[in-house]
Image (tube, rainbow, N blue to C red):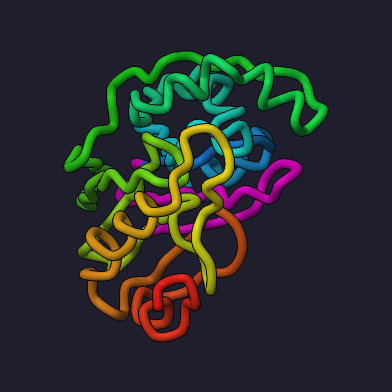
Amino acid sequence: MIRETFPVGLLGCNCTILGDNGEGIVVDPGDDIPRITAALTRHGLTCKQIIVTHAHIDHIAAAQTLKRLTGAPVYYNQLDLPLVKIMDIQAGWLGIPTPEVAPPDADAGNGMKVRFGATEGAVLHTPGHTEGSLVLHIPGEKLLLAGDTLFAGSIGRTDLPGGDYPTILRSIHDVLLPLPDETLVIPGHGKVTTIGAEREDNPFLK
């Protein structure tokens, strides 16, 4: 399986491209469309799906542009639609123009299957950072794209609209920590980690 992650946008959102047998998905295209499309071309991938882990501007801002360029549908959890409706306010937080946004082409609900080539993953609903926050688990690769739910040594902030501290802790303990220790975690920002490392050392999870 092809995997490439790189930071995009002002806040350094980790955008990840996954591919298999010429088919690819893009997770969290927050900005830097030329870099994203160049990576797809370099790996010889046709983008089949665009997955947004949550509807904060730094993760969703370029999704509609990428959809227009590739024809791939955009999936995110519909519980984050209230955040889409205040995208102008989100843009004001960063002092940038309001990006084009739209409702998802399909609701990325808990258990939704994601397939590209011979690789299969599943969406897991992990509310707390936002009401619709999700992660993408690819068990065959021991891989978790965690959005802003879990970070190396930290967890997602809960002081923005839709955030709730007890809920994010419950999501992490009930949904993420039962995964195998060796599961590689690619968070929405910053360096990679593993489930085992976070279970052992993350101060928020003690």
Residue 85 position, x and y percent, is 53, 14
Q: Is residue 67 above or below residue 190?
A: above
Q: Is residue 24 above or below residue 61?
A: below
Residue 64 position, x and y percent, is 53, 20
Observer-nearest of 135 and 3: 135
Observer-nearest of 80 and 23: 80
Q: Is residue 144 magenta?
A: no
Q: Is residue 75 above or below residue 198?
A: above
Can residue 174 be seen at all in this image of the molecule?
yes
Magenta region:
1-23
Q: Quadrant of the C terminus?
A: bottom left
Quarter of the image where one finds residue 144: bottom left
- In terms of secondary structure, what is the magenta stretch mainly? strand
Report how many numbered discs are placed on residues in the image: 0
Residue lying farthest to the front in this orientation: 166
**Who's the residue at 35% across and 74% down the image?**
195
Q: Is residue 7 magenta?
A: yes
Residue 190 position, x and y percent, is 61, 63
Residue 173 position, x and y percent, is 28, 65
**Who's the residue at 28% across and 25% down the image?**
107
Observer-nearest of 82 and 187: 82
Q: Is residue 25 above or below residue 203?
A: above
Residue lying farthest to the right in this orientation: 95
Q: Quadrant of the N terminus?
A: bottom left
Observer-nearest of 102 and 116: 102
Residue lying farthest to the bottom in this orientation: 200
Can residue 22 be seen at all in this image of the molecule?
no
Locate residue 13 relative to residue 94 in the image: left or right. Answer: left
**Who's the residue at 39% across and 41% down the image?**
133
Locate residue 157 relative to residue 111 in the image: left or right. Answer: right
